[in-house]
Image (spheres, rainbow, N blue to C red):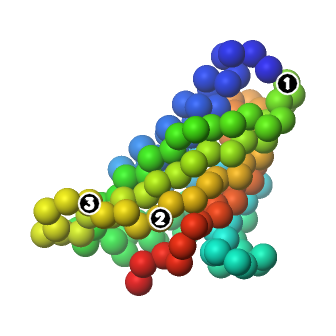
Amino acid sequence: MSVDDRLAIQKTIARYSYTYDGLDADGYANVFTDDGVFEVFLPGQTSPAVRVESRRAIRDWAARRLQARRERFGSRHYQTGTIFDELTADSAVTRTLVLVTHQHTGEAAPRIAHTGVYHDRWRRTDEGWRIAHRAAHLDQQPPK
């Protein structure tokens, strides 16, 4: 895998954060393949608490979540420490540390909402590198 491919994947990881935090459900869904899967695993669980399949379903899921929180709170997804576990010309497997903050309207400062690791499978598409499967493994139960 070339340095350009690694950078393209890193750029897509950044786009994931910027689009979701920017309330852009279409842009967020576009980082996934058409048949992409997004899952969330809570501590100690072997079945996902959330499972969304297909770019369209991911877009609709994100749009509902983003609308529900609009004007209530903002978030920041900080992704760092990406490790490439597998690398080929057309696919990759990565792990990325994630820290998510929320800042409710009226709060003076953001607070940590989630920490964990994203386990991603990537596919090269005609659109560029896209996430085929993202499994978020959270370190703690999400806040209510």
The residue where tag 3 is placed is 110
Type of amino acid under label 3:
Pro
**Is 7 situated left or right of 62 in this image?**
right
Q: What element carries label 3?
A: loop
78, above or below 63, in the image: above
The residue where tag 1 is placed is 89
Sort mark 1 into few (<14), some (14-19) or many (20+) by Cα contacts within 10 Å: few
Locate the C terminus by quadrant. Answer: bottom left
Q: What x and y, as percent, mark residue 68? A: 37, 75
The part of the image, by quadrant, that contains residue 84 is top right
Marks 1 & 3, CB-CB < 8 Å contact = no
The residues bearing labels 2 and 1 have C-alpha atoms spaced at a distance of: 33 Å
Q: Residue 8 or 142: which is nearer the viewer?
A: 142
Type of amino acid under label 1:
Ala
The residue at 62%/45% (across/down) is 96
User: Looking at the image, is mark 2 or mark 1 nearer the viewer?
Assistant: 2
The residue at 59%/66% (across/down) is 138
User: Looking at the image, is mark 1 or mark 3 nearer the viewer?
Assistant: 3
Type of amino acid under label 2:
His
Residue 23 in sight here: no
Locate the N terminus by quadrant. Answer: top right
The residues bearing labels 1 and 3 have C-alpha atoms spaced at a distance of: 40 Å
**Is 15 situated left or right of 134 in this image?**
left
Q: What x and y, as percent, mark residue 97? A: 57, 48
Q: Which of marks 1 and 3 is nearer the N terminus?
A: 1
